[in-house]
Amino acid sequence: MRILIAAILGAVAMFVWTSIAHVVTPLGQIGFSQIPNESAVMTAMQSSLGNKQGLFFYPWFDAKDPNAMTKSAESQKTLPHGLLIYNPPNVNVDANMGPMLVKEFIKQFAQALFASVIVSFMVGATFLMRWGTVMLMFASSSIAVNVSYWNWYHFPLDFTLAAITMELVSGIVAGVAIAWWMGRGQTA
């Protein structure tokens, strides 16, 4: 029960922080830009992709081709390249943010639960040791995902740094809640 309560407290702390980060600070918008001549681009996308939802990598090269990397590098000298997340009209349309917020909280609860389980093994650890462990877990996962996206898929550096910042602060606030709760009753 201690672990579940710690996970709930950690998830609530993260949820409050990420709400503040997206509503009050600019962190949730850093790295995003509007497409110039958006209407023409959207019309071309819809004409080309139709109702095919997905994540598209362009220009496409068959990974089985032994010369794929060379062809890709050469094409990037003269052609645009990147990733496109495409949703056709009437797909993933929901003006109600409730379901998305619930999914986000469940994800944050899972993160806090994993951290709480690990901290539960730290018998006799100080508050700072428990807190530091949670922060390092979040730092590791944030860097693992975001730096790889920056490196391999050329996500904007400012977006990458903002995403890492949000996760690091999530680790800080979840770590405080988890470390405090899991330390209750300990003499260390």
Image: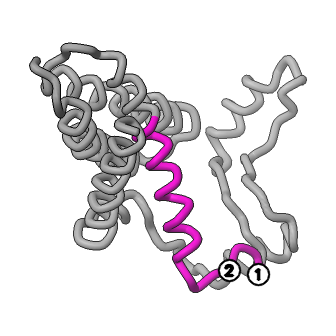
Q: Identify which amino acid the numbered label 1 is placed on.
A: Pro
Q: Which residue is mark 1?
A: 89
In the picture as drawn, the residue positioned furthest to the left comes out as 187
Q: Position of residue 161 (x, y in %)?
A: 32, 44
Q: Which-is-in-front pick, marks 1 and 2?
A: 2
The residues bearing labels 1 and 2 have C-alpha atoms spaced at a distance of 8 Å
Mark 1 secondary-structure assignment: loop
Q: Quadrant of residue 122?
A: top left
- Is the magenta region chiefly helix, strand or loop? helix
Q: Position of residue 113 (x, y in %)?
A: 44, 38
Query: Would you call the spot at circle 1 few (<14 residues within 10 Å), some (14-19), or many (20 or more)?
Result: few
Q: Which mark is residue 93?
A: 2
The answer to whether residue 110 is above or below residue 127 is below
Residue ID at (75%, 46%) = 59
Q: Position of residue 21 (x, y in %)?
A: 28, 62
Query: Would you call the spot at circle 2 few (<14 residues within 10 Å), some (14-19), or many (20 or more)?
Result: few
Q: Identify which amino acid the numbered label 2 is placed on.
A: Val
Question: Relative to residue 33, is residue 60 drawn left or right?
Answer: right
Residue ID at (18%, 20%) = 129
Q: Which mark is residue 75?
A: none
The answer to whether residue 98 is above or below residue 120 is below
Q: Which residues are magenta?
A: 89-113
- Is label 1 in contact with label 2 (beta carbons under 8 Å)? yes
